[in-house]
Amino acid sequence: MQLNKALDYFQSGKYHEAMILFEELNDQYTLPARHKAYLGVCYFYEWNYEKATMILDPIIDELDVFAPHERSVYYFSDAESHFQMGHYKEAIPLFERMQIVCHPNERGDALYRLGFCYLNNNDTANAMEFFSSALAYYLAFPNSERKRQAKQLRHMIAGLARNLQKD
């Protein structure tokens, strides 16, 4: 009964309510990986990035059996949590996994984040490569947000190219 309620809350985007129920269930039982992943996603949506990674990191490989887009949600929640905490090296393989299984119109966002991960790790060449790839996806799947990001990316890529020429 409590699990059904938690799942209903999760599926309707009521992550705080779902989180409370999943926490109680996780304390009482050994939840399967999918339900633990739901809890990790709830923590992500509650901006509790540390708890999100504590839940998702140990089970992320167990989630490989699920549908590609479902996995992309878990990868994104874990990767973005690491990214928000400044753990760029930990975020890289998760964003890489996400961009392989997400919908094509979401791929640019993963590539964009990968660019920033590499930039924050002082790897300008890889950052520029990922920003260029993100730009291509933003141009292929435009919306108002992506048009702004595409404009920003053009400037960033040009600046990074100038910096690489100086080196």
Image: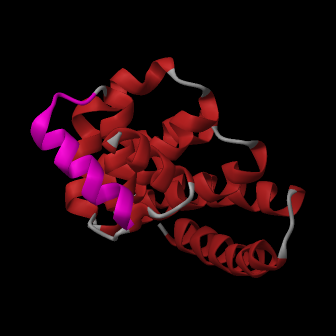
* Image height of 68 relative to 15, above or below: above
Query: Within the magenta stretch, is there residue 161?
Result: no
Q: In this view, does 8 lie above or below 63?
A: below
Above or below for 138 versus 93: below
* Residue 7 pos. (x, y %): 45, 44
Q: Looking at the image, which is closer to me, 43 or 121?
A: 43
Q: Position of residue 96 (x, y in %)?
A: 51, 40
Q: Which residue is drawn at 34% across and 32% down?
A: 60
Image check: 62 left or right of 26? right
**Left or right of 77 in this view: 54:** left
- Between 125 and 141, the residue placed more toward the observer is 141
Q: 125 or 17: nearer the eye?
A: 17
The region drawn magenta spans 16-31
Residue under the image location 30 percent in, 38 percent down: 36
Q: Residue at x 11, y 37 (%)?
A: 28
Residue 58 seen in render: yes
Which residue is most to the top? 65
